[in-house]
């Protein structure tokens, strides 16, 4: 069991060691800050999807 937990902790901490941060955490906090700012100044929040969502006219019909 000790070997598994040691390997797991190395794998989990690797991005932080390599880049100095967790990208997911930074992006999540940036989005949260942008949403809070949009609410504060009263404008709609602009999502940062990459790639952007497709045009709804080309989507499949919803299943019933």
Image (cartoon, rainbow, N blue to C red):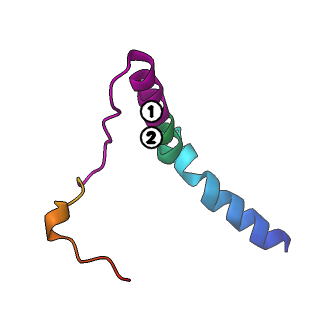
Which residue sits furthest right? 1
Q: Indicate the secondary structure of the residue bearing disc 1.
A: helix
Which residue sits furthest front? 64
Q: Is residue 54 rendered to the left or right of residue 4?
A: left
Q: How many marks?
A: 2
The location of residue 61, given as percent across then percent down, is 25, 77
Q: Indicate the secondary structure of the residue bearing disc 2.
A: helix
Instruction: Say if 50 sits above or below 35 in the image.
Output: below
The location of residue 40, given as percent across then percent down, is 45, 18
Closer to us: 18 or 56: 56
Q: Is residue 8 rendered to the left or right of residue 44?
A: right
Dividing the image into 4 quarters, which one contains the C terminus?
Answer: bottom left
Q: Inspect the magenta stretch and tell me whether residue 56 lies in it.
A: no
The residue carrying mark 2 is: 27
Rounded to the nearest whole Å, what is the CA distance between mark 1 and mark 2? 5 Å
* Quarter of the rendering containing residue 27: top left
Closer to us: 45 or 16: 45
Q: Which residues are magenta?
A: 30-51
Closer to us: 36 or 3: 36
Q: Name the residue: 35% across, 33% down.
A: 45
Crowding around mark 1 (Cα neighbors within 10 Å: few <14, some 14 to 19, many 20+) is few
Q: Name the residue: 49% across, 37% down.
A: 26
The location of residue 19, given as percent across then percent down, is 48, 42
Crowding around mark 2 (Cα neighbors within 10 Å: few <14, some 14 to 19, many 20+) is few
The location of residue 39, given as percent across then percent down, is 44, 24
Q: Which mark is residue 30?
A: 1
* Quarter of the rendering containing residue 37: top left
* Quarter of the rendering containing residue 30: top left
Q: Name the residue: 51% across, 35% down.
A: 29
Q: Are marks 1 and 2 in contact (CB under 8 Å)?
A: yes
Q: Is residue 43 rendered to the left or right of residue 29?
A: left
């Amino acid at each position: 069991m000790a070997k598994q937990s040691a390997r797991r902790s190395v794998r989990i901490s690797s991005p932080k060691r390599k880049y100095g941060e967790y990208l997911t955490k930074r992006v999540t906090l940036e989005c949260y800050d942008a949403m809070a700012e949009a609410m504060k100044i009263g404008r709609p929040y602009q999502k940062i999807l990459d790639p952007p969502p497709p045009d709804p006219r080309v989507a499949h019909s919803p299943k019933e």
